[in-house]
Amino acid sequence: MSTVTNDIHHDEHHDHHDHKPSGIKRWLYTTNHKDIGTLYLWFAFIMFLIGGAMAMVIRAELFQPGLQIVDPNFFNQMTTVHGLIMVFGAVMPAFTGLANWMVPLMIGAPDMALPRMNNWSFWILPFAFLILLMSLFMEGGGPAFGWTFYAPLSTTYSNDTTALFVFSVHIMGASSIMGAINVIVTILNMRAPGMTFMKMPLFVWTWLITAFLLIAVMPVLAGAVTMVLTDKFFGTSFFDAAGGGDPVMFQHIFWFFGHPEVYIMILPAFGIVSQIVPTFSRKKLFGYSSMVYATASIALLSFIVWAHHMFTTGMPVGAELFFMFATMLISVPTGVKVFNWVATMWRGAISFEIPMMFSLAFIVLFTIGGLSGLMLAITPVDFQYHDTYFVVAHFHYVLVTGAVFSIMAATYYWLPKWTGKMFDITLAKWHFWCSLISVNLLFFPMHFVGLAGMPRRIPDYALQFADFNKWISLGGFAFGLSQLIFLALLIKACRKKGEPVSAQVWDGAEGLEWEVPSPAPYHTFETPPVVK
Amino acid sequence: MSEQQYEKYYVPDQSPWPFVGAVALFLMALGAGNFVIEMKKGTDGNGALMLLAGFVVLLVMLVGWFKNQIDESMSGMHSAQLGRSYRQGMSWFIFSEVMFFFAFFGALFYARVIAVPWLGGASNNAMTNEVLWPTFEAIWPLVETPGGTTTEAMPWTGLPLYNTIILLVSSVTAHIAHVALEKGERGKLKLFLGITILLGCTFLYLQVVEYIHAYQDMGLKLDSGIYGNTFFMLTGFHGLHVTLGTLMLIIMFGRVLKGHFSPDNQFAFQATSWYWHFVDVVWVCLFVFVYIL
Ligand code: HEM
Ligand SMILES: [Cu+2]
């Protein structure tokens, strides 16, 4: 996509530039985008394991019908905190970490635009989750109202630690907003000479648009939790009809944030796949500009579809229809993307390295999630599917085999650039195949039990669902264990084991990030490259 | 590259302040959470103390961070490109603030246009009204809630009108001060910046008077139903922003007295002035939608 005229050898000559500060202070006080990217990624992975452990509790309880292991209130806390951690603690920080590492390298910038704020936006995150996790051990337990914290569950019927939930969400929001401001300003202001908008790699494009979505909707989430706080503790009645408010209003405000939020978690994934597929197909991306326009239209449409989460809540028929058609419209640009990825591979010289395997799995499995989304978008049938395991299947296909698989693909793709060494390919293959098989065993049968009427967020179920649930739980445990392979691989990679790699790493790879040596020096592009 | 001149982008060294700031937010959030819980239960605890400690640490952090920042700026380490980063960053921050207010305006519009009329039986909700609160009448301002809480509506004349005029004038004086800075007229700059600060303080003072009047004489409170909720949340968050803006203006005044800022090194001043204009625009929306309509 772009070539570099002046070389980057500059960096290698100045050894003092590459001097890294050492000790714990390096990480606490750092202003370096690569350090901060690493912090974000490790944080996200640890949260992924913690949230995963909670999922294991959920699946253990659902292994058999009846109440066996945990009490229902604790079960509710597990589903709630699992969701919150995966969304705000795992997927979003992982993408921010990737943006930190890669955006400056891809656009030829010396660092992120606002390096100190970058540090701040990272370090407030662990504290936010510390508060959330602490609430689990306090009197009454943690939040138990679902990650969507619908009123009145989160107001009238919640326990007092809701206050801690509210403030920790405030901090998460502040972190996301600052992270997004940094990304957007970096992209708008720090591109190397010649890096015009339509030359930007798609990962950069998708993140630019994601950052805009984040800045637009995270404050709305902050508003929603604030209203929950005042309703619960200060006598307001935003969500209480007796005072002239409306619990349905909560859902409107929440999903006005919530639907763009799901695109926040998938647009960077689209960007990643759009980087990886061309590399291993040894072809240029098919339809670059249509990819850009598709991303932008998905983002804009995402502001006018929120109420497809509320078809059964109660709305005028006209509104139900509007939100149904608007939602279906989104599948057009999404379809454009899938088409372009397939067309990129068409007649390419494809090789099946690990990042490509994850990307291929992404394309197929994400599409399954998109198709079940289309089914859910049909108002009359959503009356049947809503709040069943079918919805759980839908969003896990788009989020686990979608967002999470793309993060894994990205990690494998760029890991050699970060460490300078090839990762352990045998372990990676084990990780891929174990994850792929178990994830489908885990989530595919959920479609069936959902269609048959098994409700979500309930610790018990009718006997007829027992067989499927047994397999689902086994798939869940297997998927959980498979991630330990990934952990082993990452630890090995961080200890710099493995074969050294070249600057280009993958032989079809193009772009500025592959022009700097592997491992990428501590400071890169202090002199901007010129992009032709 | 050769013919193209560029200034090196300043990437700061390690800094302890962001981490200190993270600790501050941690203490504040944990403290505020515990404080609220203790308040509801009526028990004693150290929530308030923790919140206070968080504020102190935050203050230390702000002083340290900004001092650092100002020193760098004064010693000319900031390139034009860095200046653009700051300006763009500030603009996006203000956009995020706009969206925060949007959530509360959204709640106001939803309540007025949908929730309250439906409770009164509008659209196809006759039975809602009949079954739940048959005597409830949907009017705005909602001086009697379905549950029976009564209150009084705040008129737009009097204090709110004065406050609108005050803020609008202060936007003009802030602008004049900014123009004076760009022209290097330091005397005029000090005068009009000073006037802006005074106007901001007057606004805040009148707002407090209005709140006291509402609570003591009108029975209009935060918990008097959706009218009081939206009234106090919107004006309250706006008041907090005016307070912050006034503090920023005061700091700018101090820096102007020390001789800081020049036509091409004035990011902090510009950011403050943008913030001030933003706060004014929010007020105008408030005045129209909360008070008049
Ligand atoms: C073709 C695109 C998509 C369509 C048409 C679609 C449609 C829907 C609909 C109608 C629902 C509500 C179902 C119900 O509660 O009854 C839903 C739920 C959900 N979707 Fe999608 N979706 C799409 C893509 C995505 C993507 C890309 C993501 C995230 C990466 C996502 C994440 C979710 C989540 C998390 C929920 C459940 C929220 C909850 O109730 O907790 N969806 N989707
Ligand atoms: Cu949605």
Image (cartoon, coloured by chain):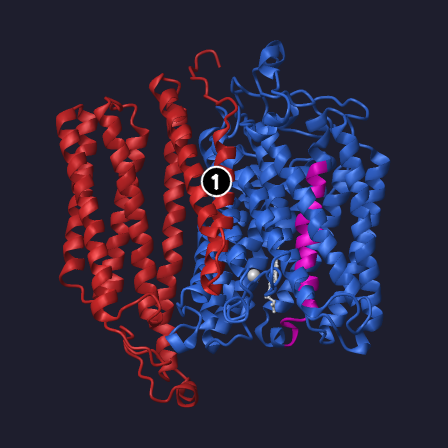
Q: Quadrant of the N terminus of chain A?
A: top right
Q: Residue at x 82, y 70 (%)?
A: A64
Is any atom of residue A439 visible in this view? yes
Residue of label 1 = B24
Which region shows up in magenta?
A: A384-411
Residue B271 in the image: above or below residue A436 = above
Is label 1 in a helix, a strand or a loop?
helix
Q: Residues within 10 Å of mark 1 (few under 14, many from 20)?
A: many
**Quadrant in the rendering for residue B156:** bottom left
Q: Residue at x 51, y 49 (%)?
A: B30
Q: Which chain is red?
A: B
Mark 1 residue CB less than 8 A from any atom of ligand 1: no
**Quadrant in the rendering for residue B180:** top left
Give the image quadrant in which the ligand numbered 1 is located: bottom right
**In this rendering, position of residue B247 left or right of residue B48:** left
Residue A441: x, y in percent? 81, 59
Q: Which chain is blue?
A: A
Is any atom of residue A351 visible in this view? no
Q: Quadrant of the C terminus of chain A?
A: top right
- Whether the magenta-drawn stretch holds residue A398 is answered as yes
**In this rendering, position of residue A347 left or right of residue A230:** right
In-front residue for pair B191/B93: B191
In-front residue for pair A400/B142: B142
Q: Amino acid at mark 1?
A: Ala
Q: Residue at x 32, y 29 (%)?
A: B267
Residue B56: x, y in percent? 41, 39
- Whether the magenta-drawn stretch holds residue A71 is answered as no
